[in-house]
Image: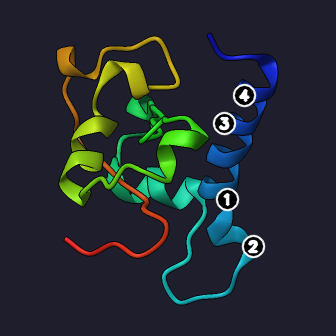
């Protein structure tokens, strides 16, 4: 069972990842409102769901090698959602996945 420290670190990592484009210069950097506007042009149906994958312990992180395909599939699992929502029962109009680090398909 996670502690409050674990949850605080997880939320801090997610917020840091989402706002990284605001803190660094670059041609492709946009803020969250631009993501919403560009992905779904209908303001009444902007419901952003945040997911984080892989959620594994620090001990396992040094031993597990996950492929981009495995990480992408795990993002859509209900256990990796940061809201109480099962994404398999809904429909997506758009999806934006932000990866950090070296991503080689």
In whole angstroms, how far apart are the C-alphas of marks 4 and 1? 20 Å
Tag 3 residue: 10
3 or 1: tag closer to the N-terminus: 3
Say what secondary structure mark 4 lies in.
Answer: helix
Judge left or right: residue 94 versus residue 82: left
In whole angstroms, how far apart are the C-alphas of marks 3 and 1? 14 Å
Q: Residues within 10 Å of mark 2 (few under 14, many from 20)?
A: few
Q: Residue at x 42, y 41 (%)?
A: 53
**Is mark 1 in CB contact (under 8 Å) with mark 2?**
yes
Judge left or right: residue 19 versus residue 59: right
* Position of 28 relative to 20 (above/below): below
Q: Residue at x 35, y 49 (%)?
A: 41
- Nearest the camera: 22 or 81? 81
Q: Residue at x 61, y 56 (%)?
A: 17
- Say which of marks 4 and 3 sits in front: 4
Q: Residues within 10 Å of mark 3 (few under 14, many from 20)?
A: some
In whole angstroms, how far apart are the C-alphas of marks 2 and 4? 24 Å
Tag 2 residue: 23
């Amino acid at each position: 069972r996670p502690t409050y420290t674990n949850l605080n670190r997880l939320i801090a990592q997610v917020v840091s990842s989402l706002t990284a484009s605001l803190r660094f210069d670059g041609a492709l950097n946009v803020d969250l409102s631009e993501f919403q506007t560009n992905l779904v042009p209908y303001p009444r149906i902007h419901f952003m769901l945040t997911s984080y994958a892989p959620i594994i312990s620090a001990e396992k992180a040094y031993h597990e090698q996950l492929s981009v395909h495995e990480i992408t599939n795990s993002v859509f699992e209900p256990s990796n959602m940061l809201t109480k929502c099962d994404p398999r029962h809904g429909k997506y109009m758009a999806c934006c996945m932000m990866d950090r680090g070296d991503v080689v398909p």
